[in-house]
Image (spheres, helix red, strand yellow):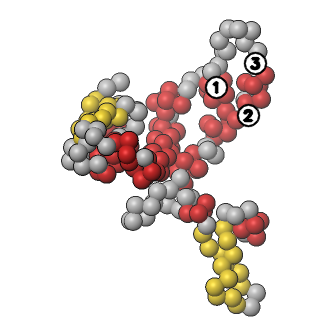
Amino acid sequence: MVDVAASGIFRVDDSTPTQGDVRYGLTAVSRLLVDDDDRGHATLSPFTASCVVPSYFMASLRLAEWLETEDGGAAPAAETPFMMAHGTDFWGMAGRDTEFGAIFNEAMGSDSRFIAGIVVRECGEVFTGVRSLVDVGGGDGTMAKAIARAFRTCGARCWSFPRLLMACRLITRWSLLLGT
């Protein structure tokens, strides 16, 4: 913990010093890794956890080989190290491996919730006067829902895969368009 505190991920809590007892507290960085709470705190914990699943690790082992591939002006045989390791992209792997798919979708959802908060808070002027928008991202409409909630004059539609949208909670001024 001393090393992790020295790197700034945690901090030493000096508020209640006791003999030989060291307490640690959260920093801005470590708060991002704490699970969502009831106050709407966004977390990147699922995204961070997804980075260590075997599929990603195996792809990382192919990075050097992928970087050394000379295409001679032609398209490379594999567009990414992930494709080189698995013969398909993230979405193909998510479609054929349900465990990977669940981890991938939760990781993308946590990233979208985190970014949606920033977009709504920092870029709200972009949505002034917008009356409707369509979220075509392959997810569950997290961004569209956040924008529709924050900007009451804006309606939103989400166009995505049926398997992702069936579990979505509908909100006012938000609708689903099933597609492939």
Q: How far apart are marks 1 and 3 (CA)?
A: 11 Å
**Closer to us: 109 or 157:** 157
- Is 81 left or right of 70, judged from the image as shown? left
- Is 66 left or right of 163, judged from the image as shown? right
- The picture places residue 137, in percent across and down from the top left corner, at 41, 33
- The picture places residue 127, in percent across and down from the top left corner, at 34, 42
Q: Mark 2 points at which residue?
A: 61
Q: Name the residue under label 3.
A: 69
Q: Mark 1 points at which residue?
A: 80
Residue drawn at point x = 60 percent, y = 69 percent:
26
- The picture places residue 117, in percent across and down from the top left corner, at 43, 52
**Closer to us: 2 or 102:** 2
The reply to whether the C-beta atoms of the residues labelled 3 and 2 are less than 8 Å apart is no
Task: State whether residue 11 is above or below residue 174.
Answer: below
Q: Distance between the residues labelled 1 and 2?
A: 12 Å
Q: Distance between the residues labelled 3 and 2?
A: 14 Å
Residue 12 is tagged as: none
Q: Which amino acid does label 1 sit on?
A: Thr
- The picture places residue 121, in percent across and down from the top left corner, at 42, 53
Say which quadrant the N terminus sits in.
bottom right
Q: What residue type is labelled 3?
A: Thr
- Is 72 left or right of 93, judged from the image as shown? right
